[in-house]
Every structure is written in structure tokens, then in C-alpha cells.
Image (cartoon, rainbow, N blue to C red):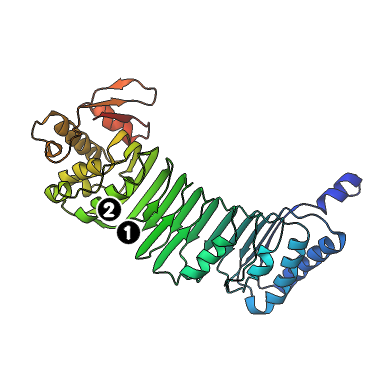
Amino acid sequence: MSILSKTWLQAWSTLPNLKFFLYCWESRTKIVDTIMERYGKGKIPIEKFELSEIFADSLQLFPMVDKWLLIALENGVKELVLHFKSYPAPILTILAAKSLRELVLHDCTLSLSSGVVNCSSLRKISLSNLTLDENMLQTLLNSCPFIVSFIVENCSGMNVLKIKSASLKVLKIIQYCKICNIDAPNLVSLDYKGYEIPELNIARESKIILHCLLSLNTAWFCKLRKFLSNSSSWSEVSLCILKCDEINMTDLQMDHIGSTGGVDVLNLNMLLMDEIIECPTFVDALLWSCHPGRLNLISIDIETVTRLIDRLMYMKNSSHSTYSHGWNNQLKEIKAFDGKNQLLQLGSEELAKKITEGKKPYFILDW
């Protein structure tokens, strides 16, 4: 192709996106070094630079990685991905780059101080398998005043996770810490997986996904209600739940923590809920906490779905509903629709079958 086309000869040697995997073979390292030197000498623009090590001798390669990284930064890299075990990423140098818009660090090591530079260009940060503490994390966020997306996943050294950012809109946390406090007034999407429900301060409608790893109890649902009450209305809430203990509805109703913020759409993942749904108070506690207008179910077990539908119908029909005491909003009506918005019969096998087949029927709840 190079012989036939001068255009192709120029194009293949100046690709803006570079993705390298380093193995233990020295020849692979020499190839990467030759390519990066050519980009450095020719000042060839780099849009994305991704470097990962696989069975490589990391310590011996660190000086080479420093060299390649500097070339990428000097050539205007916008997206930087480093997946390099124990590599001491020069974070001050990285944040000093005026072109960088997305930073992904996996398995590296970081050293941050209060003197970190201001990086006004960076919009997305993803950190995974790093060692961080609360101060390091907040210092990094403070250095990126216009950050809109932040991911922190399986980072050690943080029993307490506190995140404060006025610009943040998308946040994903997979972190098993004891306390999680989020102050992000412009947050619109939160994906959280951990032991405890985070404390949240927001100012607008948001979309949230909660993965709970512990067995649910009365206190958990009280925290969920308080959590949701931080917003007058949630556009969408998704719950992935593994276990649930018996819920004391009397204790729940005695927990007067403000008013429940209505959830427009509640997505309930029931793939692992065959045991949970046997507890009738689970559905009561869930709706008491979320007060959804629309309920979407994900399940592959007809029996599980049938039990939930039966409980919903009981709550609507029973004059002795648990909601008639201590809560002003009682379930008045429930309707089911298929994916084409056609009305379905609640007690029919067709409804449960459609849910388990993934045809996405849904429920509309009138309070």
C-alpha cells in the first residue's frame, strides 16, 4: 500500500491514536520506543495515548514510560490512559498539560500535595486500583475546576470518601468505604456500589444507580428515604439488591425524616431476588422509601415476578395497607403496560412471562 499510495504512506505513520501493550519481550519495547521517537521528532499530533503492561518488568521500563509520556504530552494529547502496575505517574506534569481532557489511571501510584497545578482543560478522570486517601482525592478534584465526569473504583486507603465539586455532573463510585459524602450541586448521574448509602447534597433532578452489597434492614430503608429526600424529584433510580432481612414497617413509619422525594422511574433489578421477594414487607419498605410513579422490573424468574405483582395488588386492594398508618400517600391504582404501551391484565401469566422474557413491560403507580 505504501508503494502504491503516497497518501497512505503518510497516513499510516501519523495516526493520532496510539495504543500499546508491553510484554516481557525487549523487541516490543524497542518498537514502541522507535515509534514514539518518530512522533517526538516530527511533532506529530497525538489525540489519544494508551499504554498497558502485560507481564512486563515494570521497574526497568519506568524511565522509558516517562519518556513516551512526555512526548505524548508535548504533542497535545487529549486522552491519556495508563494501565501500568506500580508506575509512579508524574501527576504534576500530567495536570500541567493544557490539552488534556480525559485521564485514566489504573494500577499506578500517585503522590499529591497541596501545590498541585490548576488543570482547566481536564473534563474526565477515572481512577482504579490506586492507593489514595481523602486529602489526595480532594486535592486532585480541586485542581480540576471544570471536571464533569469522575470514576473511582477499588482504590485502597479510603475508609471515608468525601467528594466536593461544583462542576461534577457524572459520578461513578465502586468503593467499599464506611462513609461516603458527596457535595455536587450540579450532579445529574450517580452510579454507586458499596456497603452504605452515600450522603448526598445536590440541587437538581438526578439519575442514580445503587448497588447494595450488604443485607438490607429497617435502618437501610430509612437511610434510602433520607437519601432520596435530598431532591424534590428524581428522574430515575435503579436498585440492584442481593439480600434483605425482615423489615419492621412500624419502625419505618416512626422514622420521620422529611418528605419522600418522588421517584419518576424506579428500575428494580430482581435477577438475584428469589429469596428477597418472599419477604412481603420488602415491597412495602421499597415503595415507602422511593414512592415511584413508574416501576420497571428486570427478572428471569416467573415466580419472583408473580409474588411482587400479588403484593402490589394486595396493597392497592387492602383497606388495612401498611401505608394507611403514618403515611398520607396510599397506593390508589396500579396499571401494567407492555413495551408498546398497551394495557395488560395484572393477574395474567402473560404479564409475568413478558417480564422474564425481557420484553420490558412496566407498571404505573397512582398515589
Viewed as shown, does residue 58 lie left or right of 284?
right
Q: Earlier in the sequence, mark 1 or mark 2?
A: 1
In the rendered image, residue 126, in percent from the top left (x then y), is placed at 55, 58
In this figure, which residue is indicated by the disc labeled 1? 196
User: In percent of the image, x 56 and y 64: which residue is there?
Assistant: 140
Q: Are marks 1 and 2 in contact (CB under 8 Å)?
A: yes
Q: Secondary structure at mark 2?
A: helix
Q: Secondary structure at mark 1?
A: loop
User: In percent of the image, x 43 and y 42: which residue is there?
Assistant: 206
Q: Looking at the image, is mark 1 or mark 2 nearer the viewer?
A: 2
In the rendered image, residue 308, in percent from the top left (x then y), is placed at 22, 38
Viewed as shown, does residue 128 lie left or right of 78?
left
In this figure, which residue is indicated by the disc labeled 2? 223
Name the amino acid type tagged 1: Glu
Name the amino acid type tagged 2: Lys
User: In percent of the image, x 56 and y 61: which residue is there?
Assistant: 142
Query: For the C terminus, which image quadrant?
Result: top left
Q: Is residue 12 above or below residue 56?
A: above
